[in-house]
Image (cartoon, rainbow, N blue to C red):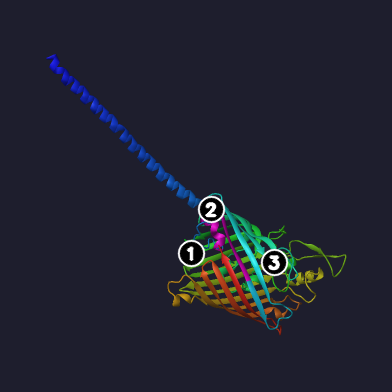
Amino acid sequence: MKGSKRPRGVAGLLAGLWLGAAAHAAEPGDAERARDDRIGELERKVEVLTEELARTRAEQAVPEEPGLASVFGLGPAASKVYGVARGLSLGGYGEGFYQKLVGDEGGARDSADLLRLVLYPGYKFTDRILFNSEIEFEHATTASTKSAGGGSVSVEFANLDFLLTDWANARAGLLLVPMGFLNEIHEPPFYYGTNRPDVERQILPTTWRENGVGLFGRVLGDQLEYKVYGLNGFNAEGFDSTGLREGRQQGNRVLAEHLAFVASLDWTPVEPLQLGGSVYYGKTGQNQVLASVAMPGTSVAIPDAPLHLWEVHGQLEAFGLHLRGLFAMAHLGQAGALTAALRSIGEIGGSETVAREMLGVYGEIAYDVLPLLFPDTEMSLQPFFRYEYLDTQGEAPSGFAGSAARAVESHTVGFSFEPIPQVVIKADYRSRDAKGGATAPDEFNLGMGFVF
């Protein structure tokens, strides 16, 4: 019986060995498949990471360009820092022109200029704290040439924003004064004409910035936007018959004996329509006592000369139509005493007067005609017309004579062509009519501009 059982035992042992070997042979196959699966998963992850790294490097070198949009009333390119998640942002713009004078040149020459190249460096530290700035290079070089004096490099604004809520945020630094259309949004694709309107250069002295602090925000959803700032005031030593422009202190070791306050409000009842206004008040004398030129050895005190400046504006943009209008007035106290003091120290001529009242108004209309011809086009061609009246000698102080030649009426007709929204080509003809028998040349202007 034992002999008969041995073969069965051997057969069972052999069967067991065969099954074990088969099982052992199967295990490496499963392991290899698992290993292959792990390798495949790792390869997929490496491929994803490689693509992400390449995209990140590309974006750092040439970031993906989001649509430009204004934030808190700043220019679209100046608003880029608000759209980044964290870290550095960079925007900018540039513009240049050719100008040919037509008649009544008065010794002036035709000219061309790379007017400005601007960078907007910004840095977002956190979701609530950011830095924003504008650095401007004017007239291509700081060196003088045989044709003209040197240009300049300036900080147009540089401020810290503390974003608290939609309705209350804080800002401190070198601030753009929130008055009119162009002082905050002065990038060339976003206004018509090669030249900015004279009203927003002489009455509202764009670009106008001063050191200060303030609050800004939006209420009622996005319908109402406000700004309230405290700033250093003008320096009245720079006022003259052409307006307030030379009284700006521009953040450069400013005199801050007299402070000023400005408040602005913009209301958008419906998306295409914007209505707004702003007021400014502050003394401008800065407690200065200066040496007299008219009477050597004596000194002259600059009067306080309080300035009240206000403007109202409105704009409608819908279905390719653009309508814009602005009215501004300046009221200067003690204008007679200031005129006498500035004559005495030699800042203005003996027949020149600083007005007690200055005013300006302009209105413009434009229409984008390309969608009528090519409904799917992204290009834009906008013929426009602007009427403007400016008088920086609106009312002379008692006992002084103003200059009727400072009252100028102008008409500008031209077009803006945008092959893409960030690039504009401009051409216009501006006719000026100075009152009181004065002459002023007409101008033919060609311009180009860009933002990024």
Q: Which residue is mark 2?
A: 60
Q: Quadrant of the C terminus?
A: bottom right
- Give the mark nearest the N terminus, 1 or 2: 2
The one of 356 and 389 positioned closer to us in this rendering: 389
Q: Which label is found at residue 223?
A: 1
Q: Are marks 1 and 2 in contact (CB under 8 Å)?
A: no
Give the CA distance from mark 1 to mark 2. Answer: 36 Å
Q: Quadrant of the N terminus?
A: top left
Secondary element under disc 2, as helix, strand or loop, is helix
Residue 55 highlighted magenta (yes or no): no
Give the CA distance from mark 3 to mark 1. Answer: 33 Å
**In the image, which residues are magenta?**
75-96
Q: Which label is found at residue 306?
A: 3
Query: Residue 291's x, y, as percent?
Result: 83, 64
Query: Residue 105's x, y, as percent?
Result: 71, 81
Query: How would you rate the neighbour count of disc 1 (Cα within 10 Å): few for under 14, some for 14-19, many for 20 or more?
Result: some
